């Protein structure tokens, strides 16, 4: 079938007729060490059109100077420090794309990440959220830790139910809501739980298209106990909703 | 072998546990399986975290709830076996020593509901990436070369 007729047929069936804009949101807090690599991995995407939005959560290091080098290709928003979820929401509110994706400033995408995911939205018009598999990537200075975990299940490719592996129709956030700004660690998990409770159509790509970097100052490493408690609260709130109890506030 | 002198220790590297509104919520960070123990079960998990022996936990339950020592011991043995099977706790012997004195029954004991370990395996995928890595340290290992640099 010729391309034009194919496009017309697609629009009649609700498929995606042209390449829609993807807003790529990069939340960052004191990310001078890795944010340039994150931005390069977005700009190297084979998919176009994209817009890149950096949401800076009041960084006090050299992040602003790094971002200055990208001023012609990246929109930068700043706010007083309010946490990762509030920073993702800042970027989300400014997004103009029909689709949105997020990349934490210390993580990396493979260059075909967005293309592969958008192909799935074309193949499945009912799809609302796509996530890829994710592989952990240790920095060179943590070789011993990488070796310690190499056979651990969490160090194998895992389904990427985190913002950094997600591509979603922006309209999904109107249905599910924004990220809960009271959460500092479990905001993405809590959002995916809400999405599941609302029967959002989610698909997991089997390929590893995202790398989550393990380094000396990962947020969860610095505050492991607080992070664990927050996940327990999120799980409890979900259980309470499903059991018909009044959910405990997850603040 | 679990007996009344056994002590259960939460595998804190592998799980995260919180007691919220009297309910213990425990998440296995390696598998994403999560657990709840409500009411009597929440009380039980608190006593495990306090490092009590099974005998002391039986006495604690009998003091607080309308349960016979035999029933509390039987329930505790069952739940302890489940906690071990789910790799949530390790078992050690408390060592010798006199048994703890019997706790006198209180007139205001609450109705006893046998503790139950509820197991949920529906969020393994959602909890596979973002929760803290099991055993991850606040102060990580550093290669010597990196420290010099």
Image (spheres, coloured by chain):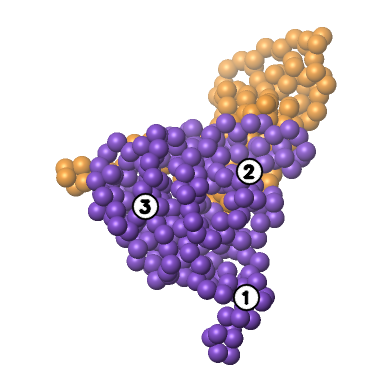
Chain colours: A purple, B orange
- Residue B118 x/y as whole percent: 71, 41
- Give the residue drawn at x 66%, y 76%: A12
- Residue A59 x/y as whole percent: 33, 38
Disc 2, SS: strand
For disc 2, the marked residue is: B34
- Residue A135 x/y as whole percent: 43, 59
Q: Both on one chain, marks 2 and 1? A: no
The answer to which image quadrant residue A79 occupies is: top left
Q: Residue furthest bottom?
A: A1
Q: Quadrant of the C terminus of chain B?
A: top left
Report, in whole angstroms, how far the alpha carbon at label 3 lies from the one at label 1: 31 Å
The answer to which image quadrant residue B101 occupies is: top right
Above or below, A113 relative to A106: below
Tally of marks:
3
Depth check, front residue: A185 or A123: A123
For disc 3, the marked residue is: A75
Binning the other alpha carbons within 10 Å of mark 3 as few (below 14), some (14 to 19) or many (20 upward) gives: some
Report, in whole angstroms, how far the alpha carbon at label 2 lies from the one at label 3: 40 Å
For disc 1, the marked residue is: A11
Q: Are marks 3 and 1 in contact (CB under 8 Å)?
A: no
Q: Is residue A165 visible?
A: no
């Amino acid at each position: 079938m010729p391309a034009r007729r194919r496009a017309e047929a697609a629009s009649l069936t609700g498929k995606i007729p042209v390449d829609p804009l993807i807003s790529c949101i990069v939340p960052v807090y004191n990310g001078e060490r890795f944010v340039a690599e994150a931005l390069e991995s977005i700009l190297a995407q084979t998919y176009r059109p994209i817009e890149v939005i950096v949401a800076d959560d009041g960084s006090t290091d050299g992040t602003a100077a790094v971002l200055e080098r990208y001023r012609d290709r990246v929109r930068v928003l700043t706010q007083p420090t309010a946490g990762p979820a509030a920073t993702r929401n800042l970027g989300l509110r400014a997004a103009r794309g029909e689709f949105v994706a997020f990349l934490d400033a210390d993580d990396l995408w493979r260059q075909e990440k967005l293309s592969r995911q958008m192909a799935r939205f074309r193949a499945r018009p009912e799809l609302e959220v796509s996530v890829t598999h994710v592989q952990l990537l240790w920095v060179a200075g943590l070789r011993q830790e990488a070796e310690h975990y190499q056979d651990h299940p969490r160090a194998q490719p895992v389904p990427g139910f985190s913002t950094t592996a997600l591509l979603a129709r922006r309209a999904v956030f109107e249905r599910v809501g924004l990220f809960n700004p009271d959460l500092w660690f479990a905001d993405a998990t809590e959002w995916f739980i809400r999405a599941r409770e609302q029967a959002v159509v989610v698909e997991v790509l089997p390929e590893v298209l995202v790398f989550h970097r393990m380094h000396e100052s990962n947020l969860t490493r610095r505050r492991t106990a607080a992070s664990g408690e927050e996940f327990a609260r999120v799980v409890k709130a979900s259980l309470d909703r499903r059991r018909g109890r009044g959910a405990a506030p997850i603040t | 072998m679990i007996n009344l002198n056994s002590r259960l220790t939460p595998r804190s590297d592998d799980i995260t546990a919180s007691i919220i509104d009297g309910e213990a919520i425990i998440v296995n960070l390696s598998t994403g399986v999560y657990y709840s123990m409500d009411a009597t079960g929440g009380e039980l998990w608190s006593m495990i975290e306090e490092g009590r022996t099974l005998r002391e936990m039986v006495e604690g339950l009998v003091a607080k709830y309308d349960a016979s020592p035999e029933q509390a011991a039987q329930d505790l043995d069952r739940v302890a076996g489940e906690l071990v099977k789910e790799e949530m706790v390790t078992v050690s012997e408390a060592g010798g020593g006199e048994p703890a004195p019997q706790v006198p029954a209180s007139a205001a004991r609450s109705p006893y509901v046998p503790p139950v370990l509820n197991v949920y395996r529906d969020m393994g995928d959602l909890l596979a990436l973002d929760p803290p890595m099991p055993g991850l340290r606040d102060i990580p290992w550093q290669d010597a070369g990196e420290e010099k640099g």
